[in-house]
Every structure is written in structure tokens, then in C-alpha cells.
Image (cartoon, rainbow, N blue to C red):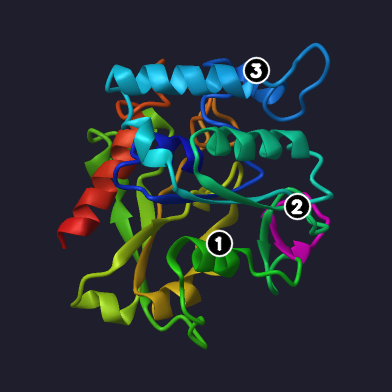
Amino acid sequence: MAVQFQVAHSRTVHGVAALAGGPYHCAQGSVLAAYYNCMTPGFFTPLPPVSLLKAQTEALAQAHAIDATSNLAGALVWLFSGTNDRTVDPSVVRALRDYYAAFKATPVLVADKPAGHAMVTEDKGNACAATKAPFINNCKYDAAGKLLIYLTGAVQPAAAAAGRIIRFDQNEFAGGDAAALSMAAEGYAYVPAACESAACGIHVAFHGCRQDAAEIGERFVQEAGYNRWAEASRLVVLYPQTIARYYPLFNPRACWDWWGYTGALYHTKDGPQIRAVKAMIDRLAAK
């Protein structure tokens, strides 16, 4: 979802980080392609060629469904693939690196840590190689810090996160019915003390599948590692939230929509979830 959002709004979103993520529009609007081609590709279910995805991206930009692809040139891109990740094959993350490189972005891929499929932290969560709830792993590696240093030139983190976590109504940004988009009624934001009365940057932290607050509480918000960096770097961290849905949307693991369960425009600026999160950002930027 981070990649999807950044490509759609590349004029204003100048960098992106993705842990175990695939290239933009990989799923081609198909849940089966998402599960097979874009997570564990094989001989009969290959990844879409980067050349095809690039051409489709350029076509979407020409149709003004996403921002101009020229914005991707020089974009900062930080990627991670754990050596014990059996959920998303390393080849998928390499394809994401190659996708951004095709647009002359500057991707960096970290692929030497023994992590399972999870958010990787310095000292929180499960054993590093695990792939289980809450999908936060202690790998003695501060992924949030590393990616923020790369994307923003962040300074050293504060000793503690001294700001406040706020809850807000996501319905307001989702046409009055967040559940209709498989989004939770409430989202979160971390607001550093310095940002209460002065302008700050914004970083959006999209949780992974089965990391929504309904399933793991506030653990992603509290333990993913962003907040203490945000404090010293004058960043508000937005934590939008999904929920699991079974009917009429089918999203049993509370994933963000990267295969089309909210409709055919899911990967564009008119994608329902992309519109909702952009509205949240605009509200923060107006403060």
C-alpha cells in the first residue's frame, strides 16, 4: 500500500519504504495473482514483467489517474526483505527495486537480516525469524530508524517518545462509512510535542495484514519504532487502520487493498482507500 500510495501521489510523496513489498500494480486487480504471482511466484504463476508494469504506470499517468511518472526520478526508496520470510519471496522485493530503478529512482534494498515476515525492530516483539502475530520481530535492527534516516535525513532518535498518540474518526475521511472500505472507525497519529504548535513533516505508517488494531491493539502504533524518531525529527506519524471484512468486501486478514477488493480504481488517486488516506494527510497539513 505504501508503494501504491507513493506512485499515485508522487508529486507530494517524495519517498517510500516497504518491508516485503512488491511492485506497483503487481496483482493486476486479481486476488489470485496477488496471492500467487506477487507473493510466491513460480513457473506457472510468474511475476508480471517490470517492463509491463512500467508501461501500465506510464499509461495511468497519461490518463491523469496517478501523478506524472517524472516525479519518480530521484525518489528515495528503502526496501527490506528478510532471509527467513516465507510469505513474500525475495524475488518479489527485488522486482520492486527494479521497478523503481526503471523510473530512475534511488532504491536501496536491505536483504541480509534473518527476519521472518514482520515489522523489524531493535528490541520489540517475537524472535527475529518468526512469522506470527503481532508480526513485530526483535532483530536487533531498527528498521523504522534506518528507513527514516534514508528518507528524511533524520537525526538521532529521542531517548523516549514524549509526544502523544491521538485517536481520530476515520469515517470523516471515508465518505461517512469507513467500514464500507474495510477501514476501521478509528485511526491513530503520533504527534511530537514540537508539532503541537509548529509545522512538521508527515510520515504515513501503513500496517501490514493482520496488524490492525482490532487484532493486535495498539502494538504496531506503540512498538513499530517510528515514534521516538518522529520526536527528534519533527514528524507527525499517521497510522491509518483497516479492519477485516468478509461481505460484501472480502478482506479476511485486514490487508490494505493492493489487489482490488474496493474496486477497479484501487491503485489510482481515485482508489477509495487512497482517497481516504490522502484526505487525512491534507487535514494534518492544514493544521
First along the sequence among labels 1 and 2: 2
Residue 103 can be seen in this image: yes
Residue 218 can be seen in this image: no
Residue pointed to by mark 3: 33
Q: Which residues are magenta?
A: 126-138
Q: Residue at x 69, y 21 (%)?
A: 47
Q: Amino acid at mark 2?
A: Ala
Secondary structure of the residue carrying numbered label 2: loop
First along the sequence among labels 1 and 3: 3
Residue pointed to by mark 2: 111
Question: Residues at badges 1 and 3 in contact (C-beta under 8 Å)?
Answer: no
How far from the left and from the top, in percent, is residue 23?
Answer: 58, 32
Q: Residue at x 48, y 49 (%)?
A: 206
Task: Classify the position of the C terminus by image quarter.
Answer: bottom left
Q: Is residue 46 left or right of residue 11?
A: right
Q: Amino acid at mark 3?
A: Ala
Mark 1 to mark 3 CA distance (whole Å): 28 Å
How far from the left and from the top, in percent, is residue 266?
Answer: 41, 24
Mark 3 to mark 2 CA distance (whole Å): 24 Å
Looking at the picture, tell me which residue is in the foreground, 110 or 106: 106
Residue 147 bears which disc, if any?
1
Q: Is residue 217 left or right of residue 283?
A: right
Magenta-colored stretch includes residue 71: no
Using the image, determine if residue 46 lies above or below residue 11. above
